[in-house]
Image (cartoon, helix red, strand yellow):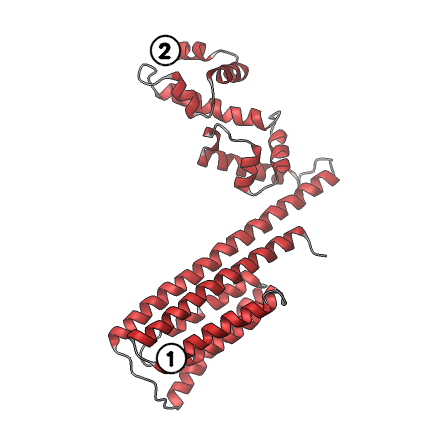
Amino acid sequence: MTTEKDIKIEQYKRQLVYYYNILMSVILALFGLIFTFIIPDKIMAWYLFGGLFLLDYTYLIVRKTYSVNVMVHSYIIIATLYNFYIMLAFWNNSIASFVWLIPIPLAAYVFFQRKYVYIYSVFALLNIVAGYLISKSFSFNFPIHRPEDVRLTDTILMISNVAVIALLLYFKDKIKRVEIYHEIEEKAQSTIIQPVPTPEKAPFADELFDKIESVMREKQLYKDVNFNISKLSTEMEINSSYISKSIRAKGYPNFNNYLNMHRIAWVKKLLNENDLEKVTLMYIYTEAGFSNQSTFNRVFKQMENITPSEYISSLQFH
């Protein structure tokens, strides 16, 4: 049965394949142009432009027909074999062509189970070993590239691979967030199904509230005048109902009460640290996220049992 989690992860994986295809198309086109106009090597240029055509043409055909996993399995195998000629061509000039194989285990880590990380790591290593044995056993009439040409291609190659790795890590993080979110949802659902408190459920409530506290304190979200539970839900990528339940479980009547607690705490901090002869009270309560003084006065009195002016007088007295 396909779940919402599976659908979301599938969407992210398809987005990753789409952006990777664009990035790799740009890289192949760039290298093709370099070997056409800057470092004349007709065979390499045609090989790269051929790879560009194969990449884009096959992607347009299969992107809506096959699953992401099938596309990625096929691509990893074909791309590794495609890189074999490039690796041989630069074997005596540069080891940078090996760099193309570095993202392969990472791609397997993003898309598949752990066993495929090992399988494709071994596959990449075998390609390098095969390249070494063939280069030592046979003589090829590859063009000899000047050191400055190799430095240029190596530099662009390294930058390209950093971009590829960054793209993979970015989407791995997004996929991990979905997995964590649904793990929290599942724990919350089990809490609803079995309403009797148990020791196993306490850590979940504490864990979620600790995350809320961390986000609120580190990013000081309460300073936003229009901040609400929906914005916090978007920020954390967690359903607002679970945020609300976690906050109530900690003794707060509702989210607004929890939000105002942070705002009043920040007001008190500013009042203690600033001279009211140099800064205005309006600056302080707006800095804490209150839109007007009447709301600020009401909330402060409700939470502290004294008015702001009484609190300020007590500070001056001390």
**Residue that label 1 marks:** 44
Point out the image quarter for the C terminus. Answer: top left
Using the image, tell me which numbered label, if any, was put on residue 173: none
Which of 85/198 is in front?
85
Residue 119 visible in the current orientation:
no
Q: State the image quarter where residue 140 is shown.
A: bottom left
Can you give x and y, in whole percent of width and height, for residue 87 in the image? 40, 78
Amino acid under label 1? Met
Can you give x and y, in whole percent of width and height, for residue 174 in the image? 53, 52
| Residue 27, above or below 234 | below
Dot 1 surroundings within 10 Å: few (below 14), some, or many (20 or more)?
A: many
Amino acid under label 2? Gln
Q: Earlier in the sequence, mark 1 or mark 2?
A: 1
269 relative position to 193: left or right: left
Q: State the image quarter where residue 153 is shown.
A: bottom left
114 relative position to 138: left or right: right
Q: State the image quarter where residue 67 is shown.
A: bottom right
* C-alpha span from label 1 to label 2: 79 Å
Which of 71/119 is in front?
71
**Residue that label 2 marks:** 316
Nearest-to-viewer mark from 1 and 2: 1
